[in-house]
Image (cartoon, helix red, strand yellow):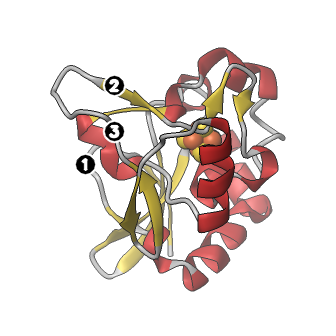
Amino acid sequence: MLNKILSKKACSNCRLCCIFDLYDLWETPVFSADMCRKITAARPGTAFISCEGGFVFKPDKLSDEQTFTCPALSENGCILGDEKPFVCRIFPYRIMSLGNRQVIALASDCKELFERPLSQLTGLLKEGLADEIFTYADSHPEIIKPYYEGYPVLLLR
Ligand code: SF4
């Protein structure tokens, strides 16, 4: 989805968006039952918690210092491939609610895109990505998170 501006090589060298800490657990992807089956086949013993009509992975133990790697992340990248959750396919773009508006904002964790010119980031949205995100969010409102302080807003709806 983002391959016009983000290369697979840049993603495979980073993978930060697949690692979480206590403060960004809210950003962990929600998996379908089918995705959970694929993950469990590759990583037996992975535990999931029911959440927002799907499932999120259950970290072993929660402590301030700890980070949690998504169980779908392998040495070769995400084992779900093109079937990965929508929020992962559009990362670092995020759809959030701000007052009575929906906004598309940018997560700073993606150093590769965070330093790009604003025109490039908004350009991709105008070329169709924003429509895709809003259309998907209309049928999957659970991906719309409350606005999180510090996320630059790129587009308002
Ligand atoms: S589902 Fe795949 S892309 Fe999404 S956080 Fe997990 S490993 Fe990363």
Q: Which residue is mark 2?
A: 67
- Using the image, determine if residue 54 lies above or below residue 30: below
The foreground one among 20 and 51 is 51
Nearest-to-viewer mark from 1 and 3:
3
Viewer can see residue 109: yes
Nearest-to-viewer mark from 1 and 2:
2
- Using the image, determine if residue 65 lies above or below residue 123: above
Viewer can see residue 91: no
x, y percent for residue 48: 42, 54
Whether residues under marks 2 and 3 lie with C-beta atoms below 8 angstroms apart, the answer is: no
Amino acid type at mark 2: Thr
Label 1 Cα neighbours within 10 Å, binned few <14 / some 14-19 / many ≥20: few
The residue located at (46%, 62%) in the rendering is 55
The residue located at (27%, 76%) in the rendering is 99
x, y percent for residue 89: 68, 50
Nearest-to-viewer mark from 2 and 3:
3
Q: Which residue is mark 3?
A: 59
- Using the image, determine if residue 7 lies above or below residue 30: above
User: Disc 1 to disc 3, how far (Cα)?
Assistant: 25 Å
User: Disc 2 to disc 3, how far (Cα)?
Assistant: 9 Å
Amino acid type at mark 3: Pro
Ligand number 1: quarter of image: top right
Task: Give left or right: position of 1 versus 101.
Answer: right
Label 2 Cα neighbours within 10 Å, binned few <14 / some 14-19 / many ≥20: some
x, y percent for residue 86: 64, 59
Disc number at residue 149? 1
Q: Is mark 1 within 8 Å of ligand 1?
A: no
Q: Secondary structure at mark 2?
A: strand
Residue 39 lies in quadrant: top right
User: Disc 1 to disc 2, how far (Cα)?
Assistant: 21 Å
